[in-house]
Amino acid sequence: MGLVQVAVAAAKETTLRTPSPVLLGILAVALFMWASRGSMNKNLPPAPKGYPLLGNLLDVINAGGLLHLKMISWAQEHGEIIRVVLGPNTEYVINSDRACAAIFQKNAAVLSERPAWLVGQKYITNYESMDLLDASNPRWKLQRKIALQNLTSPQRAEDGLPFLYHETLKFLYQVSQDANAGTEKQTNLWDSIGRYVYSTFTSQLYGLEVIIQKNSMMATISGFYIADIFTALDYLPLALKPWAKNGIKRHDSDIEFVEKRLNYARQLVNSGSAPDSFMTRVLTSTDKSGATDSEAAYVALKLIAAASDTSRVSTWVFLEQMMMNPHVQLHARKLIDDVVGDRLPVWEDIERIPYVR
């Protein structure tokens, strides 16, 4: 029985026994708020039709893995910015590059803070990961400084290219050796792309390659947590919060993983055989900005998780688009061949082939 059904059943039972003034008052307030929602929301972006109190929550849950199609449908109906009501919470979905620029670039100082993700922030990362912290949080500032100094600064922009070239060659060789390549039997391409992008980032961050397609590093955090919407559920005892128990377990597992990688990186540094990587730079740096080695190693894990999933999906979508638009693929191939010849492309070639930018 769902939460709403329980509430309705309890209300019916209470009403039949005795009409509670408190219950009647709550119902009256709820009905008033629902009836007056039009005037309160008249200056807000449009929202799809929803259900009383729940809004669009059931639509989002029922969409499941096809939620992106539901969002596209709503965008086509309602425009560049839509308001999605999820129970007591409201989210805004931006559907155009023009709206993104106007909101997140021109008004970044006001609108760039992250939303509150109860499960991710409190349980899965224990308020320790900059990818879920507000930019005003001191820990976010510290971790961002670590990342900027040792990985993401403009001065280090080209440091990742050797890793990218190496992993690209491995990926191309792996795919070319697949006897089922180009047929319906080629079922491991998604895993191959995953190994490719994860290994590119783990090499840069930890100095470790991902050799096999199934690897613990490739486990990602995803999911839809009802407690992120109905935050009052967090007041329940821990025994009644499976999302909290699973989140704590995941955090403990991440910390164990990080410490093992940190110890391995220390061994390489101490032996003088450490490859160039984020962790090697951190361990050999005299300026750690007040961060511990363990925190830096945790930052590395979260950078890998943040970068790899988006890169994996964008690579997959690119391959799909090339298959769906062979004329574009053929034209790009000709332009690349004219510039590159029989060697492999390098990053500098992109300046001479504006079509592929």
Image: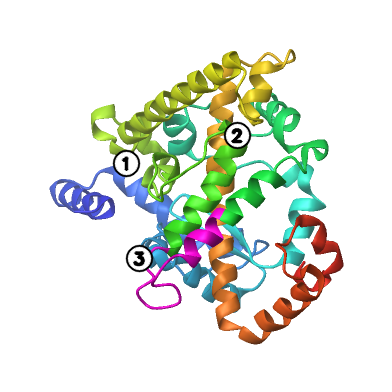
Magenta range is 170-188
User: In front of the other: label 3 or label 2?
Assistant: 2
For the residues labelled 1 and 3, the Cα–Cα distance comes to 34 Å
- In front: 129, or 104? 129
On residue 62, the disc is: 3
The amino acid pointed to by label 2 is Leu
The quadrant of the image that shows the C terminus is: bottom right
Q: Is residue 171 magenta?
A: yes
* Image spot of residue 74 (x, y percent): 54, 73
Depth check: 147 or 20 in front?
147
Q: Marks 3 and 2, Cα distance to the nearest angstrom?
A: 38 Å
Of callouts 1 and 2, the N-terminal one = 1
Amino acid on which the number 3 mark rests in the picture = Asn
Q: Which residue is pictured at 68% across the width and 13% down the height? A: 290
Which structural element holds mark 1?
helix
Going by the numbered disc 1, the residue's amino acid type is Val
Q: In this figure, which residue is indicated by the disc labeled 2?
A: 205
Distance of mark 1 from mark 2, alpha carbons? 58 Å
Q: Name the spot of residue 320 as percent of width and height, x first.
A: 54, 74
Q: Choose the circle earlier in sequence order: 3 or 2.
A: 3
In the displayed structure image, the side of residue 56 where residue 17 appears, left or right: left
Image position, residue 175 (x, y; %):
48, 64
**Observer able to see residue 51:** no
Q: Residue at the spot x=59%, y=72% of the render?
A: 75
Question: What residue occupies the far front of the structure in this picture?
Answer: 342
In the image, residue 272 sits, relative to residue 301, either above or below, namely above
Q: Give the residue at mark 1.
A: 22
Q: Name the residue located 37 percent from the left edge and 48 percent from the top edge.
A: 214
Q: Earlier in the sequence, mark 1 or mark 3?
A: 1
Q: Is residue 6 visible?
A: yes
**Direction from residue 212 to residue 288 in the image, left or right:** right
